[in-house]
Amino acid sequence: GIQVEQSPPDLILQEGANSTLRCNFSDSVNNLQWFHQNPWGQLINLFYIPSGTKQNGRLSATTVATERYSLLYISSSQTTDSGVYFCAVGTLSSGGYQKVTFGIGTKLQVIP
Amino acid sequence: KAGVTQTPRYLIKTRGQQVTLSCSPISGHRSVSWYQQTPGQGLQFLFEYFSETQRNKGNFPGRFSGRQFSNSRSEMNVSTLELGDSALYLCASSLVQGEAFFGQGTRLTVV
């Protein structure tokens, strides 16, 4: 099956710093999402980004599908950005249905 | 628009028992997927249902099963619980294919 690698696995930032999280995938994908998992476990949708670039406030994401990677940028980080960031890719199964595979996540800690 | 609702939020069960978790998707979404999250294995896909039919299944033993009702609500069942089944179980809903939205999860502890 498809491999999804996220880097770095852990990241500690000073409040106000910028960061880039990376997601590499080993095969063509149907779609790609970035999530933030809050301390209570819920996965919060950040971006649905099969290709191209999107921005939402201090966050932006870029997916280059032809080169099989996606980047999540966090600017002017805040303590509330702490948590685990997941990349998830959707691929089509042999039956033509979508299967979603998650990376292992990047654990981000923003310190005041 | 209501989000994905999972019940119960927390559950404690004894080894050997069985458990049923529920997931109500976003109105209009017909696809419901289930995931297990553990510290050691990360987020693993369990199965996906669409229009009451299981379309995809992950690599889990037969003790894990699910179903979907005509209103798209889904349940997953785990029989003969083992300590290793302790995990956060997440449900996601989506339209046919595309962006998935997750519920808050059910945290299951097996003692």
Image: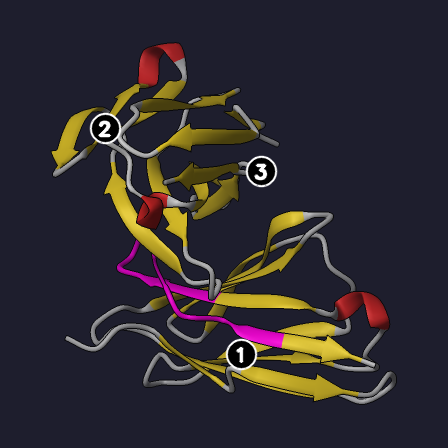
Which numbered tag is attached to residue A58? Answer: none
Q: Could you tell me which quadrant the C terminus of chain B lies in?
A: bottom right
| Magenta span of residues | B91-107
- Reading the image, the residue beneath label 2 is A75
Q: Is residue A40 visible?
A: yes
- Depth-wise, is mark 3 or mark 2 nearer the camera? 2
Looking at the picture, how far across and down is residue B31, in whole percent? 36, 64
Mark linked to residue A104: 3
For marks 3 and 1, give the CA distance. 28 Å
Which is closer to the viewer, label 3 or label 1? 3
Please state which of the two labelled residues, at mark 1 or mark 2, is closer to the viewer.
Answer: 2
Q: Residue at x 47, y 70 (%)?
A: B53
Taking the spot 43% from the left edge, 41% from the top edge, the residue there is A85
Q: Secondary structure at mark 1?
A: strand
Please indicate whether residue B23 sits to the left or right of residue B101 in the image: right
Residue type at the position of mark 2: Ser
B87 is within the stretch colored magenta: no
Quick check: can you spot residue A89?
no
Give the CA separation, mark 3 to mark 2: 22 Å
What mark, if any, has residue B67 been given in the picture? Answer: 1
Q: Which of the two labelled residues, at mark 3 and mark 2, occupies the earlier sequence position?
A: 2
- The three-letter amino acid code for the residue at tag 1 is Arg
